Amino acid sequence: MSIRHARVPVDGHYLHVAESGAPAGRPFLFLHGWPESWRTWTGVMEAAPPGARLIAIDLPGIGESTGPATGGSKAALAAIVHSLVEHLGLADLTLVGHDAGGMVAYACLRRHDAARVVIMNTVIPGVPPWDDVLRNPYIWHFGLHAVPSLPETLVRGREREYFDYFYDVLSVDPSRLTPESRDAHAAAYGGTALTAGFDLYRAFAQDAQDNTAATGPVSTPLLYLRGDGEGGDIDAYARGFRDAGVRDLTTATIEDAGHFAQEEQPARVWSRISSFAG
């Protein structure tokens, strides 16, 4: 697979865009979560046919995407992603977001145009079962990462070791997240990017307020995917989306995958996405 790299100027930022497939093909835009980078999507991109246009980015402030701090607000990040979509002229777009990238995709669903949206392996701030997730003692890192400065002090210089904990605990088979992938993700959070990553958590309270205020009906088709080894009741997530106004919802699980489904089972993830896109 040949990857074309570019840094695209958008809204005062330079976004790192990694692209494969046919430039005139049907577009799929992929948003990574924490602690990941654009590289988390390489297996999915390899599984796609050559006629599709596959685009993965580093979220603003992370990896090779540079620019002013966003504070981690998913609405602010969604606005930047929307500007990129317009800049690239992506019509009939399937927008795919994993983890925090899924939260950004939800903000796009609410505020901007996309033909369809896929959200993977995440809970949406302010949308049930958000409160249940916050009460879960196994989700301890939400609180730690939201503390100003402290997680940077603890993690800087130990990014690979700290991130490895999450890859190992949250995946069905940790070996599927390769050393090369782990190294690339850790490198993407060097310097100020480490703060940009933790800011994704620091913005959760504002994100929840923004999402709670936006509960009108939305007709954009949404696919919610979850690894079958991650736990959680997918029906509870479906009820939350529907109660928030999502009218066209499909849910599915990825077999033999945990939280990092796109790296654990990339071909199965692509199959679900492509079937949804029609």
Image (cartoon, rainbow, N blue to C red):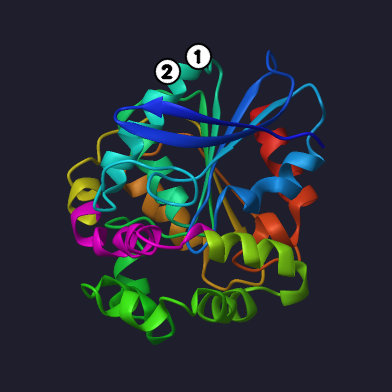
Identify the magenta region: 188-207
Relative to 31, is 273 on the left or the right? right
Relative to 69, is 190 on the left or the right? right
Frontmost residue, 191 versus 214: 191
Dominant SS of magenta comes to helix
Q: Position of residue 207 (x, y in %)?
A: 24, 52
Q: Residue at x 50, y 74 (%)?
A: 159
- 105 magenta-colored: no
- Residue 171 falls in which quadrant of the image? bottom right
* Mark 2 in CB contact with mark 1 (< 8 angstroms): yes
Marker disc for residue 51: none
Residue at the disc numbered 2: 86
Q: Residue at x 32, y 55 (%)?
A: 127
- Residue 144 appears in the rendering: no
Relative to 111, is 21 on the left or the right? right
Marker disc for residue 89: 1
